[in-house]
Image (cartoon, rainbow, N blue to C red):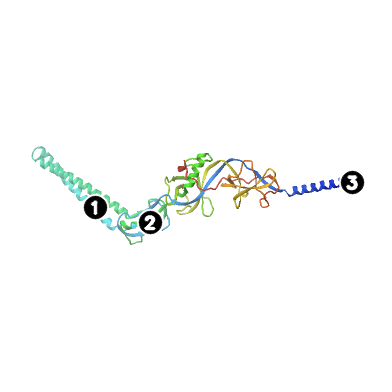
Amino acid sequence: MRLLGLVCGVALAALSACKSEQGGEQAKQALPVGIITVGKAEVPVVYEFVGQTQSSQEVEIRARVNGFLEKRVYTEGALVHAGDVLFRMDAKPFEALLEAAQAELKQQQARLETAQANLNRVRPLAAKNALSQKDLDDSIGQEKEAAAAVEQARADVINAQLNLGYTTVVSPVTGLSSFAKKQDGTYIDAANSLLTYVAKLDPMWVKFSLSENELLKFRADVKSGALKSPGEGAFDVKIVLADGSTFPESGHINFSDASLDSATGTYLVRAEFANPGGVLRPGQFVRVKLYGAKLTSAMAVPQVAVQQGDRGAYVWTVDKDGKAQQRVVETGEWNGNDWVIRAGLRPGDKVVVENLVKLQPGIPVAPHPFTPPPAGAATSATPPASPESAQ
C-alpha cells in the first residue's frame, strides 16, 4: 500500500509538471502585439480632388479698325503689362481721315462765325422794324444750323482720333501672352479681328467638379450633425502641383455653380489663389484640398491597421479571451496617418496595429499599448459640396 501510494504520488507530480510545462509553452506562444483602444473623437477632414488652373481674366486682343497689320511688337508667350504695345496697324489712312475731319471742323467753325455775325447785324435792325421777323428767324436758324454742324465736325474729329489710336493695339491687362494669330501684312476686318490672347496670372482660378451624390452626401452629413462645415466661403484651399510640391498660397472658394451640368452630372466649383510670382499657369492639373470640415464623432485607426481581404477592408482585434479576431470594417476618410472607420468598430474595441503579419484568427496574443505616430492635419476624401452650395 505504501508502494502504491508512492507510485500514485509520483504519477500525479509528473502529470502536474506536464500541465505546467504545457501552460508555460502556451504562454510563451502568445504573440506580442501592439494595440490601441478606439474611441469617438472630433476628427478634421480634408476633401481632395483633381482641379485645373484657369486664368481669372483671359482677354481676347482684337483689332478695332479695318486695315493692314503692319507689325507684331511683343514677344509671343512673354509676360506683358497693361498698356504694352502688342501690334501696330498701318496708320496712314487714319491719319489722312483725321486731317480731313480737322479741316471740316475748321470750315464749319468759319461758317458759324459768319452766321453769328449776320445774326448780330439782323437782330438790331429787326428790333427797329427795318427788317421783317422772317429775316430775323432765318438768321437765327442759320446760326443754330452752323453751330450744330460744328458739333458734328468736332465729333468726326474725335472719332478719327480714336480710330487712329486703335491702330496701336495695347494689352488691357498684365498677363501671359499667346502666339500671334495673324501675321504681319494681313488685312484685318471684322471677320478676322482676333489677334491673340492675354491671360491674367494674378489672381489665378482653380476649377473642379463634384458629383451630385457627393453633394447630397455632404449635405446629409451636415444635416445629421455627423459633419461640421466651416461655413460658407470659409474652407481653406490648398493645391498640390504635379511634382508633389504644395503651392505656398492658400486660396478660397469664390464661385459654385447653382445648377447641375446635365452632360457630366457634376457641379462646377472655383477657387481663387494669389499668384504674385506667376508660378501657376493656365491649364495646369493640380490636386485640390479643402480644409476646415470636421467629423464630429468619428473613430480612427492607423492606416497600417487596415488590410484588404476577400470581404473587403478589415482590422485585427483582440477579444475578451485575449485572442486575435478579424473584423470587417467600412473605411472612410484619411486623417494624416489614421484612417477613419465609418462602421465595424465600437468604442472600446482593441485594434492591433503592430506585428500584423503573424496574426491568425483565434491565436492567443499578448497585447501591449501602442503609441501611434503624430497624425497629420489632413484627411483625404471624395470631394464635398462647396460651402456656398452646401449651406
Find residue 110 and name its label.
Answer: none
Percent of width and height locating residue 70:
33, 60
Q: Secondary structure at mark 2?
A: strand
| Label 1 environment density (alpha carbons within 10 Å; few <14, some 14–19, many ≥20) | many
Percent of width and height locating residue 222:
51, 40
Q: Secondary structure at mark 3?
A: helix
Mark 1: which amino acid?
Ala
Q: CA distance from mark 2 to mark 1?
A: 32 Å
| Label 3 environment density (alpha carbons within 10 Å; few <14, some 14–19, many ≥20) | few
Mark 2: which amino acid?
Thr
Nearer to us in this view, 124 or 133:
133
Q: Which residue is mark 2?
A: 196
Percent of width and height locating residue 18:
81, 48
Q: Which residue is mark 1?
A: 101
Q: Which residue is mark 3?
A: 4
Residue 298 visible somewhere in the drawing: yes
Mark 3: which amino acid?
Leu
| Label 2 environment density (alpha carbons within 10 Å; few <14, some 14–19, many ≥20) | some
Given this view, does label 2 or label 3 mark the residue nearer the observer?
A: 3
Nearer to us in this view, 214 or 391:
214
**Who comes first in sequence, dot 2 or dot 1?**
1
Q: Residue placed farthest to the left in the image?
A: 130
Residue 346 in which image quadrant:
top right
Q: Are marks 2 and 1 in contact (CB under 8 Å)?
A: no
Percent of width and height locating residue 5:
89, 44
Q: Are marks 1 and 3 in contact (CB under 8 Å)?
A: no
Q: CA distance from mark 2 to mark 3?
A: 114 Å
Residue 372 placement, left or right of 265: right
**Who comes first in sequence, dot 2 or dot 3?**
3
